[in-house]
Amino acid sequence: MRVLIIEDEARIANRLERITRSFFEENLSVLVICDSLQKGIDYIENQPIDLLLLDLNLNGQNGFNLLESVVAGSFHTIIVSAYTDKAITAFTYGVLDFVPKPFDQARLEMAFKRISIPTKGVERNIKFLAVKKAGTVRLIDISELHYIKGAGIYSELHLQNGKQELHDKSLEKLQQLLPDTFERIHKSYLISLAQAERILIQPGGRYGLLLKTGEILPVGRSRYKDLKDKMI
Amino acid sequence: MQRLFFLLAILPFFISCKSDVVYEEYPVLYQNGDSILWANKNYDDSAWATRQTSSADSVFWIRTRIKILENPAAMPGVQVNAFGAFEIYWDGVFIGTNGKVSDKNTPEIPGTEITYFSLPDSLSRAGMHVVSFRASQSYLTKEQRGIYVKMDLYKDLLTQPLIITSLMNLMSGAFLIASLYYFFLYFNSSKRQWTTLIFAMICLLFFALLILEFIKFYIDIPYTQFFIRLEAIGILTMIIAVLVPFYFTIQFNFKRKKVLLGILSISLIAIYVFNYRHYDYSAQLYSICMLISSTMVVLTAIRQKEKGAVLVLAGLLCSIVVNKYLVYDFGLFIGFTIIVLCMLYLHTIRSRVIEDEYHSSMLLSSRLQLELVKKNIQPHFLKNTLTSLIDWVEESPKEGAKFIHALAAEFDIMNTISEAVLIPVRQEIELCKVHLTVMQFRKEINYQWEEFGIDEAEFIPPALIHTILENGITHSIPIADCGIRFSLRFVKTNIYRQYTFETIAENRIPSRHGKGGTGFRYIQARLSESYGDNWEFSSEASPTGWLSTIKLYYK
């Protein structure tokens, strides 16, 4: 686990570091603290990370402008901020969690747990997926999503208009962010249940899902029962 | 305003008032010397002069004819305008005197300029009549004004001036009250305004002018003092003619006040000199000067888009029309009244503006108070402080307690100063120092504070330096080993007091020190609140860090 902390208050940064180290223990391979947004962005551009702990208000600069480009990255973002009123907006952009200041160890660890254990019942307000394209960041409304196909460490977003976009986050990470109406039907497919027409049983004991558009996607054997329950 | 319309509506009746006695006038003839025969109706005066040529001691006679065309409906009367003393004869019958004509042994008792005499029915039937006067003019002998005779019903001769006077007194009473009101307003006002005083003066002068003009109807002024009143009226008119444009120049922010008023004053004096003793004409010219200069000011005001200028222009035009088409006595006063009413209206507009400014300044003050209180409860400060505090308490309870004390001290000072507009500079410094202690716990940066030449007797708006300090903390990177140093200097000269506050550190890039941050707006608003326009604030990078300067000028 490679963690980057962007926080300009030394005491708080140290606290974040301490809690992070105690949580991840030996799983933590890298932990870096940057005390300004610019330093943090430079770091992200040059070094791969898995998790970003970000303060939204640094040295009088509004970190919100950067949120779009940060959430488009391959890593999960946890906002640690004093501005609790920004939490809802942050969630719509697809952050993993929003930890309001002042925080204790338990609250931060709860956020960390969301990385490994997909927590059910947590309110997910994500409205957009941010996609990096030709140096700019584009926001895609998740209602435009048709289905998502895993492609190694990336994901392919198949949109309802037939277009495709590449997202830096893995299918696992996106599933953690997306609401429960998105179902993993296969190790390589995540779909919006609203798009599903019916389950097909194909020759050879294979299962398929017929989409409203007529496309057929494979359904994993282990996920068939789960999906069948949800479809009825 | 309604009264004015009423007056405007009613005045034409008086002016167009034709005599109820139908008669024809004949030329007035003069003859020096004295003979009672000259009173006779049939005396042949064809050799008499048509102009008065009397000398100081001599008695002289005046004769004129009046042809009454119809028998009058009621008792007729004669109005005589003349200088001197006289006995009046109607068809040779003595009907009255005005003063006492000089005799060899007794000096003349001067009569008044205007007199009225009633005529018995027996003398005033239709037909030709002769009016003759036995007169003397011992004083003001250079004023050979001659004599004017006018006929009307006796009752009308007496009541017409009364009606006019009553209306004019009504008007002058209004101006007296207005004048008193604005004088009181000026002297009891906390913010004394020039315009209020000028307006009160104009109202008072105008009251005096009206009283003086119409006093002739109820006080008998001997002809020897006739000019004193006119002289006084002339001077009053002249002063008003300067004050009215002056008032407009102030109200409408006219830029070349001195030039305009200079030219106006010179032309008024010139008019006075060149038309000496032509009182009515001079007054007419004064008012024309006043109207022209006022119109110039108002036209400029309209171009500058000043509030109320269009209405005043309308008033001025109205006044010009009235001045031109009504007989002098009324025209001038009605014109003046219209102008004064315009001024009154303007004054209320300005009062409204001042009232609004006052309210908005009150609003600003309370907004600034709120801004100050918000400094310590805004999430960025409070939540970060609390997060650090939790950490200190968990890690090192003793240090945590110190942190809590520092925070309590900052809150205490903030609480004390929150409602103040100005606080002792020492209190401000204490606030800064305690804030640094809090920030040191949060940022774990070594902050140092230095001060030079602080005058303990000085006051400054609350949280001014605190705000600059906050900016310094936010936008600076500590220099290795030295941390960040803050240095406050105070300099006092005859012209200004100056605080310079330097943050000695490395500036962050990109730095948002530039103008327009909320912190700077707070500083500027606070400075304006306490010092009006007499301050300067600058904030810029310096070789060693960042330098902010607050300059407070003495008025």
Image (cartoon, coloured by chain):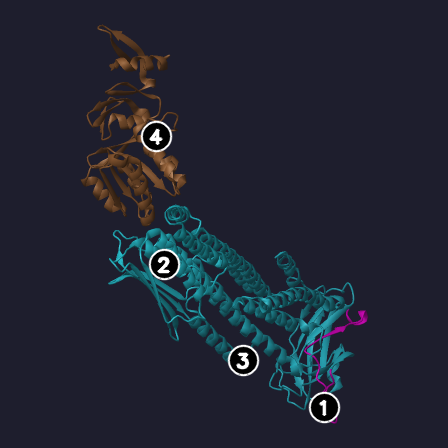
Chain colours: A brown, B cyan
- The answer for which chain carries disc 3 is B
Pointer 3 and pointer 1 on the same chain: yes
Please determine whether, in this image, residue A145 is positioned above or below residue B197.
Answer: above
Q: Nearer the viewer, residue A41 or B388?
A: B388
**What label sits on residue A199 in the rendered view?**
none
**Residue type for callout 1:** Pro
Residue B155: x and y in percent read 76, 67
**To which chain does the residue with label 4 belong?**
A
Dot 1 corresponds to which residue? B107
* Quadrant showing the N terminus of chain B: bottom right
| Structural crowding at the residue carrying mark 1, measured as other residues with C-alpha within 10 Å and reported as few (<14), some (14–19) or many (≥20) | few
Residue B356 locus on image (x, y percent): 51, 56
In magenta, the rendered stretch is B99-124
Q: Is residue B334 left or right of residue A172?
A: right
Marks 1 and 2: which is nearer the front?
2
User: The residue marked by circle 2 belongs to what chain?
Assistant: B
Residue B530 included in the magenta stretch of the image: no
Q: Amino acid at mark 3?
A: Tyr
Q: Amino acid at mark 4?
A: Ile
- Give me the C-alpha separation between circle 4 and circle 1: 116 Å
Q: What mark, if any, has residue B468 been given in the picture?
A: 2
Q: Are marks 4 and 2 on the same chain?
A: no
| Nearer to the camera, B100 or B252 | B252
The residue beneath circle 3 is B276
Alpha carbon of mark 2 to alpha carbon of mark 3: how far? 70 Å
Q: Which residue is mark 4?
A: A126
Query: Is label 3 in a helix, a strand or a loop?
Result: loop
Q: Amino acid at mark 2?
A: Ile
Write the residue at 75% across / 70% down.
B77
Q: In the rendered structure, are the residues bearing label 3 and label 1 in contact, judged by CB atoms less than 8 Å apart?
A: no
